[in-house]
Amino acid sequence: MDIAGNRTISSIFSQYAAYHPDKTYLIFEDFEGQCQQWSFAQFEGWVNQTASWLLEIGIKRGDSFAFHAPNSPVFVALALAASRIGAVIVPTDHRATVDELVYILDNSESRLVVTEFDQLMLTQEAAAATSCVQEVVVSRCEHPSGQPVFEREVARQDPFPPNVEISADDVVHMIYTSGTTSNPKGVLFTNRALIYGAEVFVRASGLRNQDRHLITLPVFHAAAQCHAFWPSLVCGASIVLSPRFSPSRFFGLAVRHQCTMAALFSAPLRMLLAQPQTENHRLHRLRNVTFAIALTDEQFAEWDTRFTAPLQHLWGMTETVGLPLMSPLYGPRNLPSMGKPVLGYDVRIIDDDGNETPPGEIGQIVVAADPGRTVMKGYFKNPKATDETLRDGWLYTGDNAYHDEQGYFYFVDRGKDIIKRGGENVAPSEIESVIKEVGGVSDVAVVGMPDPMFDEVPHAFVIPQPDVTLTEEEIIEQCSQSLTRFKVPVAVTFCEEFPRTSVGKIQKHLLRDQALESTE
């Protein structure tokens, strides 16, 4: 038996609710400053009611349902209730367009969507275009909507756990991640893998039962879940949840609610550094802030001087579930690096022949994988992509890196052509397929360009058809109608031809170099 054992995430929560029922579990503060608060025992009752309601409307073990809204306590109740009955929650990006949401709902076979009033019209339009969604329910809504209201429906249920057979190996969570193909892939998380990754993180980050974790990253993203939400749950820590990250509110939240831990990306770190200095910046109790993607040496120094909140660099993917690389808690953290392999994960860098690389030599990161236990179970309804990623006991990440003599790993680039914008994965091919729908486009290539705030941003290169005049505005408008805002290119360059390899493959690195030269 490993550290996950035969537990489920909902059974762990029930144990803490019985052990310290009156301890504060969750504080939710909205952008009007209104707070809601639950103890472990109070939230346990709400989870049981939510689970019973899901069963009542026909969501049974193995069924999928979607959560399409900003961060809220409703997500937490639904996620734990899914584990309690063996159902699968599918959190989606509430900024998604209709087309993007239709694909995820249909692909995940979601039978229910829980949303909020601001997303209701778009959600209804998307649900009507699917073959699977049977009901749309609105939460946190005071407006007449004509839809069932989550809180009212749940309040009718008894606060006792439903009698449903569940397993540590049940798939209870599905997060969609961009890939090199145009369609996102549903990553399958079991109870066991979520617990394994969370337990490993607890030990590598020093997270404690007495901590209060500030969660401002979006819950549809694996980062909010795997280095904040689930680790806090497995060690019985309290959480403070915000609808979204706000650089002007972040330290105020941390101070008001006496938070001791937080999870961020490099883009939010830069946004915080861009804020005017206030007294809150040094009144907080944050003792560890985990983050992904390195800052510059100057930014690290400024952070330490201004905020005095220790940073811990880490690396992982949605597919790894946990965080295989983290800065060591003891000894030099060496923040420019992604850290070292943590206890519980075997991480290596290999060359094209599968051999481990010596220090300083670039290769691909691979992680030892027991599917459904230490990493994802696989991609939903995509055995081909699963077999390409999970091979011979290893998860092939597509990320290129090197390590030094001391065992620190350093990120180089993404071999899978993914653009990383402010922590969000953007597939160039998804943008390219939208641009190809514009009349008069002969060919298109999208690359990631360096950005001082968001790490990378999409830049489109377009070849018009002969005798056709296209404008940047046309291209960006088409993308804005079909894609979430962070996927829309920040610029468009028109070309007569693309540099290509001998077999005709576009050499995107040369396009990127040309664009960089033109800005110098």
Image (cartoon, helix red, strand yellow):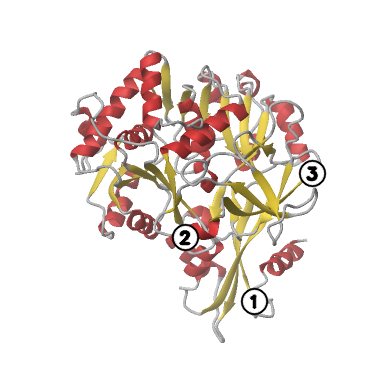
Regarding mark 3 in the picture, which secondary structure is present there? loop
Q: Nearer the viewer, residue 311 or 277?
A: 311
89, above or below 47, in the image? below
Residue at (80% x, 50% y) in the render: 360
480 sits left or right of 369 in the view: left
Residue type, mark 2 in image = Ser
Amino acid type of disc 1?
A: Cys
Q: Which is more foreground, mark 1 or mark 3?
A: 3
Residue 303 occupies which quadrant of the picture? Answer: top right
Q: Earlier in the sequence, mark 1 or mark 2?
A: 2
Q: Observer-nearest residue: 465 or 217?
A: 217
Q: Residues within 10 Å of mark 1 (few under 14, many from 20)?
A: few
Element on which disc 2 rests: helix
Q: Residue drawn 61% across and 47% down? A: 367
Q: Is residue 149 visible?
A: no
Q: Please tell me the numbered disc located at residue 404.
A: 3
Question: Which callout, 1 or 3, points at the residue further toward the start of the chain?
Answer: 3
**For this rendering, which residue is in front, 393 or 132?**
393
Looking at the image, residue 116 sits to the left or right of residue 458; the answer is left
Q: Which amino acid type corresponds to the residue marked 3 in the rendered image?
A: Asp
First of labels 2, 3 by sequence position: 3
Kindly give the residue lying farthest to the bottom in the view shown: 467
Per the rendering, the mark at residue 495 is 1
Give the distance between the C-alpha atoms of the residues marked 1 and 3, in whole angstroms: 41 Å
Q: Secondary structure at mark 1?
A: loop
Q: Position of residue 421 (x, y in %)?
A: 59, 51
Residue 515: % across, % down: 70, 65
Mark 2 → mark 3, Cα distance in angstroms: 43 Å
Q: Are marks 2 and 3 in contact (CB under 8 Å)?
A: no
